[in-house]
Image (cartoon, rainbow, N blue to C red):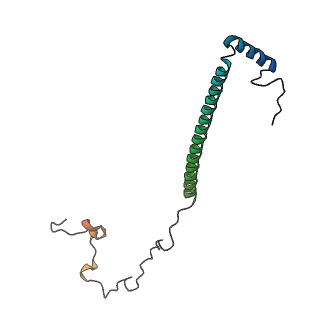
């Protein structure tokens, strides 16, 4: 706690200045009005303190709300960072196996005995894909 010098009492006003102010109030309002003025000043100071406490509580409440929202946003950002930085891998049982080549030794090559005698000769259009390799009756 800070020690205040005796000559500075309130708002930087020394004891002599307070005495002059009290004498001026006594001369202006008279001895009968001084207790009433003191009560009014006391009520005014209490009102100012009450408003100050309310403002401080509002500030603390809003700052707590803002801190809570900031923490929520930071948690969401952290989760998104984690999701972005972790590689995406499928479970081992869901991974597709690579296709195996079809190597059926029975169907690799037809022998001369199995070949169809009608289709031994190739036409020019036999190498074309489906709709074009069909033979039509119009001689094309």
Left or right of 132? Residue 51 is: right
Left or right of 103? Residue 8 is: right
Q: Nearer the viewer, residue 106 or 75?
A: 75
Residue at (61, 41) in percent of width and height: 60
Q: Nearer the viewer, residue 97 or 114?
A: 97
Q: Where 93 falls versus 74 (above or below)?
A: below
Q: Where 78 falls versus 50 (above or below)?
A: below
Residue 50 x/y as whole percent: 61, 33
Residue at (81, 34) in percent of width and height: 2
Q: Where 110 falls versus 78 (above or below)?
A: below
> In the picture, residue 102 is in which quadrant?
bottom left
Left or right of 139? Residue 19 is: right
Q: Nearer the viewer, residue 113 or 48?
A: 48
Figure quadrant of the C terminus:
bottom left
> In the picture, residue 47 is in which quadrant?
top right
Figure quadrant of the N terminus:
top right
């Amino acid at each position: 706690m800070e020690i205040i010098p005796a000559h500075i009492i309130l708002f930087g006003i020394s004891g002599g200045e307070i005495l002059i102010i009290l004498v001026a109030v006594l001369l202006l309002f008279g001895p009968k009005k001084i207790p009433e003025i003191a009560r009014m000043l006391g009520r005014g100071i209490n009102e100012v303190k009450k408003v100050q406490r309310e403002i401080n509580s509002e500030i603390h409440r809003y700052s707590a709300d803002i801190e809570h929202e900031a923490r929520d946003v930071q948690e969401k950002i952290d989760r998104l960072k984690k999701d972005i930085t972790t590689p995406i891998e499928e479970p081992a049982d869901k991974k597709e196996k690579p296709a195996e080549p079809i190597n059926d030794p029975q169907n690799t090559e037809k022998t001369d005995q199995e070949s169809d005698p009608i289709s031994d000769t190739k036409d020019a259009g036999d190498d074309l894909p489906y709709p074009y390799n069909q033979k039509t009756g119009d001689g094309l």
